[in-house]
Amino acid sequence: MTLFFVGMGLHDHLDLTFKGVEIARRCDKVYVELYTSLMAGLNLRKLEEILGRKVHVLSRGDLEGAKAQEILREAMEDDVALLVPGDPFIATTHIALKIEAKKLGVEVKTVHAASIASAIPGLTGLSFYKFGRKATVVYPEPNYRPEAAYDVVKENLLRGLHTMLLLDVKAEQGLYMTVPEALRILLDVEEKRREGVLSPEALAVGVSRAGSLNPEVKACSIERLLSLDLGPPPHTLVIPGDLHFMEEEALMYLCGATKDEVEVHKRRLKLLREVRAL
Amino acid sequence: MTLFFVGMGLHDHLDLTFKGVEIARRCDKVYVELYTSLMAGLNLRKLEEILGRKVHVLSRGDLEGAKAQEILREAMEDDVALLVPGDPFIATTHIALKIEAKKLGVEVKTVHAASIASAIPGLTGLSFYKFGRKATVVYPEPNYRPEAAYDVVKENLLRGLHTMLLLDVKAEQGLYMTVPEALRILLDVEEKRREGVLSPEALAVGVSRAGSLNPEVKACSIERLLSLDLGPPPHTLVIPGDLHFMEEEALMYLCGATKDEVEVHKRRLKLLREVRAL
């Protein structure tokens, strides 16, 4: 039978697609995982109401342990749906499960849904084609390197590309990193490395609650962004690269940047590249 | 009043979200544009049925000309919905309209939907975090440079990153570029430039009908991909960069690459970088 990965979109149960709901309704069993991203408006009771059935909630570790084997065994006999926040397979765990399913001869089908990957270019007005590789800013821990995100920003800036930075989620502890927290972590790396990639006057864009009908999108200097209240999570951070004329307009008219902040940004990028070229 | 940009997702009317349908139903006027991407399963009659109302179809040029001004004037008085394929604002035209609306004091809200941006990492199993900048392979024309896509692939490969290549759409002429057409355009650039970025034995992934329940995803040498039938459009092309162990498994188990094709790919990338380092 078939294992359906069904994306739930970004914010609440209304972000489900008709296709996703139709499939989940006729599967023999429905699971949901809610720990890879925060869907701030999602309510499990409402989700069960829209699907007209019981939904089994998975906890972190379930998809990597014995529970995953159980789900795969079920999918060999029955149609099983696994609902996930955003669009499926952005999380490595889901890809591993899909490969495992294929190895066992289980058919896998995907219902796509809204993702932060396209929502961020849309909300900021920064061109989809000018985003370089993405990174996640993680809470400092012995095994993690928050410097990896700094390196990605640096690599992208030197090529004039924008960087989308996803922020760490530790759902079990109720921790969802905010834009100011992420900025402080990145400024700490700058403090240590002194490569001029970021500074208080550098331009950044903070986004909160992408996918809701009331997201906040603020483009300004890091210094100003540190003092702004973007409201509840989830938050996302963007470091812009070179700006086309229409992107400048977007940052000013859609995201509230001042002409001055945009000009400082352009001078900083030029300088950063000149120094590197020496 | 408000101008709502409502994403329709990737394939058919069932990819609409509950939020999008709810909003379109209660707007005073609903427009749809169907020329920036192909939604292969979309049927206008079914769309009007699901929305329970008349939908006004825009043609290319409408959103850049006098019609755009008319829509903006309407949105100053009434709630207006503009339905677009995929997730809104991937097309520059939509961003320009959003900026224009803001300048006129019209409120703008977005309903996000599935996009090729996240569907492609999901379908191929290639890590979302390892995609570099994207590009579009365009039909050769006096004012366009198909070489821009080649340069993006080169830049990404030298950094070990994957490249997602969107393929040209000329909806008015019924032209939707296929993977073999795109490969031939890129091989022609290689023929002229001889930088070793692409070759018949290079690894590529062809995807067709992403977002439908029956997409094709084939990873193999360009030579083999040129001879495969991926079925009807839309098509998307991916040139993989460095492969993590799980990405190798994904290309083999999910996309049909042979162990041999993966090994040749790894040797080619290593060589490409060694030659550049000389």
Image (cartoon, coloured by chain):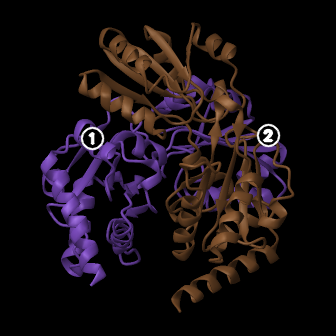
Chain colours: A purple, B brown
**B212 sits left or right of A165 in the view:** right
Q: Residues within 10 Å of mark 2 (few under 14, many from 20)?
A: few
Q: Which residue is mark 2?
A: B232
Residue B33: give its label: none
| Residue A134 seen in this snapshot | yes
**B207 sits left or right of A200 in the view:** right
**A208 sits left or right of B272 in the view:** left
Residue A249: give its label: 1
Please state the horizontal and vertical placement of residue A155, each as a whole percent of the image: 38, 71
Q: Residue at x 37, y 75 (%)?
A: A145
Q: Which corner quadrant of the image does residue A81 belong to? A: top right
Q: Residue at x 54, y 60 (%)?
A: B148
Tag 1, which secondary structure?
helix
Tag 2, which secondary structure?
loop
Image mark count = 2
In this rendering, which labeled residue sits more in front, label 2 or label 1? Answer: 1
Q: Is residue B126 above or below residue A43?
A: below
Please state the horizontal and vertical placement of residue A85, each as a whole percent of the image: 52, 43
Q: Residue at x 28, y 73 (%)?
A: A273
- Quadrant of the image for the N terminus of chain B? top left
Q: CA distance from mark 2 to mark 1?
A: 38 Å
Question: Which is nearer the eye, B35 or A124?
Answer: B35
Question: Which is nearer the eye, B224 or B177?
Answer: B177
Q: Mark 2 belongs to which amino acid?
A: Pro
Q: Are marks 2 and 1 on the same chain?
A: no
